[in-house]
Each structure stands twice: as C-alpha cells, then as structure tokens.
Amino acid sequence: MALEIDTRAPDFELANQYGERIRLSDFRGVRPVTLVFFPLAFSSTCTSELCALRDNLTLFQQKGVELLSVSVDSKATLRAFAEQEGYEFSLLADFWPHGEVSREYGVFLEHKGFANRATFVIDTDGIIRASIITEPGEARSIDAYREALAHVVPASV
C-alpha cells in the first residue's frame, strides 16, 4: 500500500544516472521534491511520461521543486535513457537492493519486479503533500502534476 498524504517521506540515498549519490534529506529545508517512480527505462509509456515531464520542466522550476525520478534500472541504463531523450533531471537507480526504495514507498509490484507509476510531492519538511498513483499501464497526466504541485509552497529560487 502506497504511503499516504501527510506522512513523512522515508529518506533514501540512490545513485543518479551519472553515479552521483542523491539523498532525499539533502533537500529538507531547501526545496520541495517531486519523486516520480516509473517501471522501466525505454518502455513506451514510461518514455512518453518522462518526455512530458522534460517538456514541462518549467512547472517544477517555477515553484523551485526538485524533480527526481526512480526506477529499478541500473545507473548505466538510466544514463543511456536520459541521453537518448534529453532528460535534464535526475534518474535514480533503485537497482540494488532491488526495489528497496520503491518498497519503502509502498509502490513496488512484487509479481512484476518493478515499481508502479507513482508520484509523491514532498514539502521542505519532508512531508508528503500530494500523490498521483495510477493503475499499471496508465500514464500520469501533466494536469495531475499541476494539481499536485498546487500543494507545495514555492521554494526561494
């Protein structure tokens, strides 16, 4: 079961597509975070969803929100995916232990071996203020992101 709104987001540290270690707690007191779990790099729905985020990155930048995406792919796969599609946000590898962060957020699909499509908007205090969780195979819309981002106070940019 996915984490609920108004609960503390579990801290984690994962490598991004460049091997840099990204820790959720580093953003506390600094800027809100939108954490986007997606099943697999290079799959059609995931690619279209992340391309929509890429094309609407200003939605997040205008509110000073850090956009972080997470999948069970390796950092090498995520780097190739980001380079091919021109993603300018972090793609985090929940590779090993396999799906550990996805499990902590309650969105890992054990029978499939990857995370469901789930988004958590986390404020500067580390509290989940909004979420978008769709059925497997169902994409999240940019309008859903707009609505979710309305629940965070803009960071100073």
Image (tube, rainbow, N blue to C red):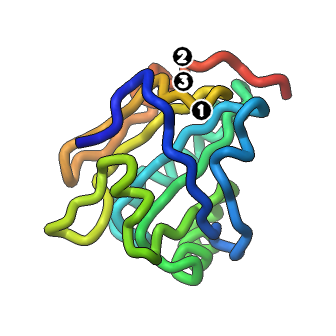
Could you say which disc has been placed on residue 150 in the image?
Answer: 2
Q: Residue at x 55, y 73 (%)?
A: 78
- Residue 60 versus residue 136 in the image, above or below: above
Q: Nearer the viewer, residue 106 or 149?
A: 106
Q: Secondary structure at mark 1?
A: loop
Kind of residue indicated by mark 2 = Ala
Q: Residues within 10 Å of mark 2 (few under 14, many from 20)?
A: few
Give how far apart the Cα atoms at labels 2 and 3 are: 4 Å
Kind of residue indicated by mark 1 = Gly
Number of marks = 3
Give how far apart the Cα atoms at labels 3 and 1 are: 15 Å
Give how far apart the Cα atoms at labels 1 and 2 are: 16 Å
Expressed as whole percent of the image width and height from the top left, the position of residue 109 reads 22, 60
Q: Residues within 10 Å of mark 1 (few under 14, many from 20)?
A: many
Q: Are marks 2 and 3 in contact (CB under 8 Å)?
A: yes
Q: Nearer the viewer, residue 148 or 26?
A: 26
**Precedes in sequence: disc 3 or disc 1:** 1
**Precedes in sequence: disc 1 or disc 2:** 1
Kind of residue indicated by mark 3 = Leu
Q: Are marks 3 and 1 in contact (CB under 8 Å)?
A: no
Expressed as whole percent of the image width and height from the top left, the position of residue 101 reads 44, 58
Task: Determine whether, in the image, residue 138 is placed left or right of residue 149.
Answer: left
Q: Residues within 10 Å of mark 3 (few under 14, many from 20)?
A: many
Task: Determine whether, in the image, residue 42 is placed left or right of residue 10.
Answer: left
Residue for badge 1 = 126
Q: Residue at x 69, y 75 (%)?
A: 19
